Image (tube, helix red, strand yellow):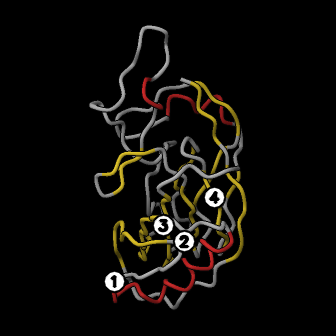
Amino acid sequence: MKLISRSKYIGNIDFPTYTGRQHYMATTRGDAVHLPAHISVYESRVFELCNALNYRGVIHVTVDEKRLEVGQTQRKPELHVDGRFMKNLTKYNSEGGWGNGGWNHTCNEIPARMSVAVASSVARCKVYNGDFEGTPSEQGNLSHIRDQVGEGLLVPKNEWHLLSPDCVHESLPADKICDRSFIRVAFEDELSY
């Protein structure tokens, strides 16, 4: 399976003061961002991102503020793509490709090829741009293509980066104890890169 892995810088984000907030996949719209009260401090930041991308549709916002110990990762530690392969929607075919669009992301039980934007207050996410060959596991793992990806790009702190649906990336272990804020916005559409 060919993975077209792309990322691009969108803009900066000023993270709110760390308090340990966490919420998985709050669904809202890019043109009228309303988040649960405990993460509402992120509303204006998400709205600015959607404005920069001229995106008005449905989004799913994950906020994960977490204390990391040395060697601990906040998100998935191995090479992966986000999402989960949906067997009932897509199957491997005899021509070697994936039917019905390939890898699908699932946000709140809605399967689609979704672009995501990510940002964090501590640089511990690495993305790999390029065209790679490999089939993600059902959990998205791609550690078996490590020899293809090269050095990658460490996403700088306090920057939004837009990732393609097939963007290969990984969370790196903390090199010191830190309070790290992470935000991911999944778009119900595949955006341009």
Q: Secondary structure at mark 2?
A: loop
Real-space Cα separation, disc 3 to disc 4, in angstroms: 27 Å
Residue under label 3: 70
The residue that disc 4 covers is 162
For residue 146, side relative to residue 27 (left or right): right
Residue 67 occupies quadrant: bottom left
Q: Which mark is residue 176?
A: 2
Which image quarter: residue 21?
bottom left
Residue bearing the label numbered 1:
36
Q: Label 3 is placed on what type of residue? A: Val
Marks 2/3: CA distance?
5 Å
Label 2 sits on what residue type?
Answer: Lys
**Mark before the other along the chain sequence, 2 or 1:** 1
- Nearer the observer: mark 3 or 4; the answer is 4
Distance CA(mark 4)–CA(mark 1): 23 Å
The reply to whether callout 2 and callout 3 are in contact (CB within 8 Å) is yes
Q: Is residue 124 left or right of residue 67?
A: right
